[in-house]
Each structure stands twice: as C-alpha cells, then as structure tokens.
Image: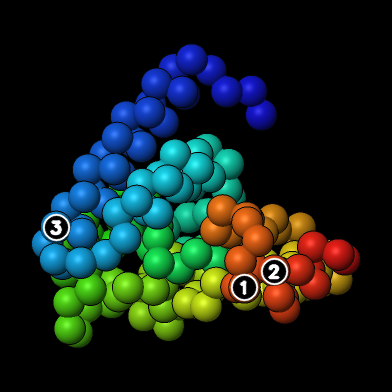
Amino acid sequence: MKITDNDISELKKIANEVRKDIIEEVYCAGCGHPGGALSVADILTVLYFNEMNINPKKPDDENRDRLVLSKGHSCAALYAVLAEKGYFNKEELKNFRKMGSFLQGHPNMRKTPGIDMSSGSLGQGLSIANGMAMASKLDKRGYRVYCIVRRWRNTRRTNLGSCNDIIKI
C-alpha cells in the first residue's frame, strides 16, 4: 500500500497526540515508564492507523490483525493509541495505573478493549506472537501478527529461554 505525503502528515499529528497522552497518563498516575512508551509511539501509530486490519467496533473479530506488546511496561503508548483509535474514551487515560482501572501497568486482555495478549515478563511475547501467527496460517485465516519486543541486547532476560529459542525457528 502506497503511503502519501498527506498520510505521513496525518500520522505525525496522531503520533504527537499519542506522545502527549503518554505524558499525561504517567503524570496522572505519578508513576510509569514514559521512556519505553515514548519509544514505541510512532510504530504503534503507524500500525494501528495505517497498517493493521482492525475495527474498534469489532475488537474481537476473529480475522483482525493482532499485536503483542512483549515489553508490557510500555503499555501507556498502547493505551494512548487504542484511545485515539476509539476503543475507549480518552478520558479513561487519566485513570492509568489507578486502583479499579482497566488500564493497569501491564496490558490485560481480559479487561482492556483492543488488547490481544496480556503481557508482563519480558521475552515471552515473541513466542506468543509466533503461536498466533502459526494459528493464522494453520486455520487459513490470513490475519497478521505483530510483536514489539524490548531493545535486543545480551541480558539474562532475553539471552535465555523463549526469545532465544524462537529466534532459532
């Protein structure tokens, strides 16, 4: 799909709104991970507003594309994008990490509209996304699966176990 200069301009405006929302979320909560969230604002904006086959009115559509945020601590960005896309009211962002809110410090697919996979432990998302992609192929559904992982480096979290194993497939 060819992207026009007008598309790029619109995506930049949305990404700027997302960044503002991230800062407001973390400020209202008094805690969070603004750096990690800001680092994925552009990619999430492009995916949700230009690339992915999704519909906020049908968040559980079996043929929708999926996103796994393996670095769940960056969820403020995902929440901001979901609110901009219309999955829930933007006012809810002010309740980020508050008791009783569906917008907690890591994504929860059972409580938050638009979340395809709960995440927490770094390094598990890639394996989960791989399983989702395999299911799409085996079931002949054709939906795409995107996975956002933490910056890759030699750490005990990413050099051992599931991430290292899935990269070898």
Residue 163 is left or right of residue 75, and the answer is right
Does residue 139 appear left or right of residue 68 in this picture? right
Badge 1, how many Cα within 10 Å: few under 14, some, many 20+? few
Q: Of the residues tagged 3 and 2, which is closer to the observer?
A: 2
Q: CA distance from mark 1 to mark 3?
A: 31 Å
Q: Can residue 61 be seen in the rendering of this structure? A: no
User: Is 94 situated left or right of 57 in this image?
Assistant: left
Name the residue located 53 percent from the left edge and 17 percent from the top edge. Answer: 4
Q: Residue at x 39, y 73 (%)?
A: 106
State how far apart marks 1 and 2 are (Cα): 5 Å
The image position of residue 58, as x and y in percent, is 47, 64
Quarter the N terminus occupies: top right
| Contact between labelled residues 2 and 1, with CB atoms less than 8 Å apart | yes
Provide the secondary structure element on which disc 3 rests.
helix
Task: Name the residue tied to disc 1.
Answer: 156
Q: Quadrant of the C terminus?
A: bottom right
Name the residue nearer the viewer: 64 or 150. Answer: 150
* Percent of width and height locating residue 51: 58, 41
Labels 3 & 2 near each other (Cβ < 8 A): no
Indicate the position of residue 84 as horizontal and vertical percent values: 31, 48
The answer for how far apart the CA atoms under marks 3 and 2 are is: 33 Å
Could you tell which of marks 3 and 2 lies nearer the N-terminus? 3
Q: Position of residue 70 (x, y in %)?
A: 55, 66
> What secondary structure is found at the residue carrying circle 2?
loop
Regarding mark 1 in the picture, which secondary structure is present there?
A: loop
Residue type (three-letter) at the residue carrying disc 1: Arg
> Which residue in the protein does label 2 denote?
159
Residue that mark 3 sits on: 27
* Neighbour tally class for label 3: few under 14, some 14-19, many 20 plus, Cα within 10 Å: some
- Give me the residue at 56% from left, 53% from top: 151
